[in-house]
Image: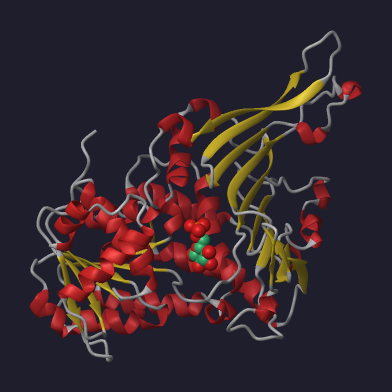
Amino acid sequence: MTLRRPADQDIVVVGATGDLAARKLLPALYNLDIEGLLPERGDVIGVAPMDWDDERFRSHAEEAIRSFSRSRLEPRRFAAFAARLRFVPIGPDGDLAPLRAAAGRPERLLYLAVPASAFTSLARALGAAGLAAGTKLVIEKPFGHDVDSATRLNAALHEVLPEERIYRIDHYLGKETVQNLLVFRFGNSVFERVWNRDAISRVEITVAESLGVEHRGAFYEETGAIRDIVQNHMFQLLAVTAMEPPISFAAEAIRNEKVKVLDALHPVAPGDVVRGQYAAGSVDGEAVPGYRDEEGVDPASGVETFAALRLQIDSWRWAGVPFLLRTGKRLAVRDTRMVLSFREAPLHLFRAVGLRALDSNRLVIRVQPDEGISITFVAKRPGPEVTTQPVEMDFSYEGSFKASTPEAYERLLLDAMIGDPTLFIRTDEVEQAWRLLEPLQEAFAEGYPHLSLYSAGSWGPLEAARLLEPDGYEWVNP
Ligand code: BG6
């Protein structure tokens, strides 16, 4: 397969001295360069309100790549990459006029690696500096914090740029496993035939993190698990899992089907949600503090670090199948997966020999870590008696491909440079995702549902089990 090389353009990172640039963007650009996937001509221009020059930026990039790149920093390769690096200081007012003089190419990808509160003013500054023409703009979540703020942000962006030049990143869509789900579903006829309410009894999506809020306590106080993970990453996983086959693999065909899933989601009732917050506990054998003792967090905080939701999709394919979403910080392990449980066999021929309903077939899509897919089924234990046991058929990325998985940001930066919007979030998707959560946000503001504490290192509040009780099931933990 020939790899796609983007047309000539500059890559501008506004906020180039910050955390996102160091951890993700500079290492991703370096890895793309190694693979010959940066434009043949074009600079990587760092922009920030700092008194830095090109040399200072190059040594910053070198350090960032040394610390965070998936491939090791090699001096010769880095020297070639560093030759593209330039730095443009701007004032604290965010005026982008200095960039106009520095931009070498008429086309550019401009990444706003800055806090979301600066998106609108920087987009306007882009227009005021006469740089809107020729710019593709990349921004990251949070895209607003409710319907109203998201609509205002979108309107402000559209004053400067048309929708097709705005690339909203949800880095979960750049993950290999999530992209593979499209291939798995629509490239294999065997699975698509059972991908519906006739065969599937429930779908669980878990995004579990063992880390706490780290140094982002103040940010998290304004956010919470629903806004940080559910509104974006989990709704994207849900959309890709539940969407109808698109009429083609073209960007808009895929994005249309994803939006239809969000449109078909039943409004979320606060009674179908469990909220939790981690208390002190132990993770990987180490004692860790509770959320309220983290730096930057109100000691009486009512912010949720865990959320579980029971959702329904009102479509012919999924009516009556619960979609159970669960996410939390300081859970037992870091693990993101989708579990599709299949209906039990219609006759329990083997109940007498110990086959339990819980052993019914399961398809597990492991998004991270240990990326792969497995199918669980029951087998007869060898021997003269008929005894059954659940067993697994497993595909692992590492085992099958023996290559290191590219970082989500590499794929997303490349697609944005090329101008392929498939893996980016459209205006209507963002607004619909917020609309769905609006009743919840109102209920939360009134303290409902109440917040349950859970010990760090557990699987969240015991109450989360309540969401599966109507069907007599339990959460499937890794
Ligand atoms: C970010 C959230 O969007 O995703 C973080 O703001 C979270 O709170 C992170 O830790 C998880 O991403 P990943 O790729 O490590 O699963």
Pick the front one: 403 or 15: 403
Q: Residue 390 placed where, x, y %?
A: 74, 28
The N terminus is located in which quarter? Answer: top left
Q: Residue 94 placed where, x, y %?
A: 26, 87
Q: Residue 340 placed where, x, y %?
A: 64, 40
Pick the front one: 73 or 142: 73
- For this orientation, the residue located farthest to the right is 352
Q: Residue at x 74, y 80 (%)?
A: 447
Q: Quadrant of residue 16?
A: bottom left
Q: Residue at x 31, y 76 (%)?
A: 15
Does residue 190 appear to the left or right of 469 in the view shown? left
Q: Quadrant of residue 140?
A: bottom left
Residue 142 visible from this viewpoint: yes
The C terminus is located in which quarter? Answer: top right
Q: Residue at x 81, y 57 (%)?
A: 466
Above or below, 454 against 223 in this view is above
- For this orientation, the residue located farthest to the top is 384
Above or below, 54 against 185 in this view is below
Q: Residue at x 14, y 63 (%)?
A: 84
